[in-house]
Amino acid sequence: MFEKQFVHNIKNHPMKKSALLILLFVLGSALLFSQNMDEKNGPWRSTYPDGSVKSTGQFNHNIPYGEFIHYYKSGIKQSVTVFDNQGIQARNSTWYESGNLMAEGKYINKQKDSTWSYYGDSIDQLIAVEQYAKGKLEGKSITYYPGTKQATEVILYHNGIKQGDLRKYFPNGQVMTEGTYLNGKLEGLFTLYYPDGSTQLKGIYKNGEQAGEWKYYSITGKEITYEEFIYQQSTSIEADDPDKSGEKIQPF
């Protein structure tokens, strides 16, 4: 039930689609480092309950080396991991059952490291690029509109926590949102734009909460609403605007 609802919620949303595909890869690749590590030497393989091959590889006193291959139950290749440096480092490529590339990147000491790239199945196109250090996001993380080279979101991480500039984009490349993260929470000026580049709203975040005066603008650039946020309470004051549709603009 949870899986059905989860898939339903991400339908037709490029950023959430990217998140789902990355999650599916993480769940699948966990098999790589979750095998029973009883004493293993030489060629090795594991099987599914029906006897079909699940994984093949080779060990030297429990240290994996060379090429390991994992298969779907259908017999189609799922991933190839090549170990070197006494099993400390490994390069991984993972495919969908369709044969399209899902993800590729590097492990060091069983943790993601350096650049990881993720791809969509139906379009076989790059959908996200992430940077890792010791298993945690580190540096720039980019998601893309499917089938394009246009980023949907660019965000910075440090030690697995959002830290630094945030930018989201419209499909035409125009900036949609600008903000800053401090220790995982929005901090400072936050701006939302219309597709033509004009400002839709702007305000200040403090410790992840809206604070002070937030201003809302019409597409023509006229201020139509502002809100004053004090201790998580707000008072909305409407400006006189004959062009206003009557529907309040929301920041999210």
Image (cartoon, grey):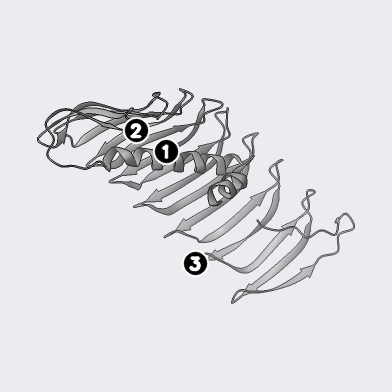
Residue at position x 58%, y 46% in the image: 4
Q: Which mark is residue 25?
A: 1
Q: Nearer the viewer, mark 1 or mark 2?
A: 1
Q: Residues within 10 Å of mark 2 (few under 14, many from 20)?
A: many
Picture coordinates of residue 203, whole percent (x, y): 62, 61
**Comes first in the chain, label 1 or label 3:** 1
Question: Where does label 2 land, which residue?
Answer: 105
Amino acid tagged 2: Gly
Q: Mark 3, residues whose alpha carbon is within 10 Å: few (<14), some, or many (≥20)?
A: some
Indicate the position of residue 177 as horizontal and vertical percent values: 60, 49
Left or right of 117 on screen, residue 205: right
In the figure, is residue 168 to the left or right of 105? right
Q: Nearer the viewer, residue 21 or 175?
A: 21
218 above or below 18? below
Mark sitting earlier along the chain (1/2): 1
Left/right placement of residue 73 relative to residue 83 reads right
Residue placed farthest to the left in the image? 61
Q: Amino acid at mark 1?
A: Phe
Looking at the rendered structure, the secondary structure element under dot 1 is helix
Q: In the image, what residue type sits under mark 3?
A: Asn
Spatial CA span between label 3 and label 2: 34 Å
- How far apart are labels 1 and 3 at the CA level? 33 Å
Residue with the mark numbered 3: 207
Q: Nearer the viewer, residue 44 or 205?
A: 44
Between 219 and 143, the one lying in front of the other is 143
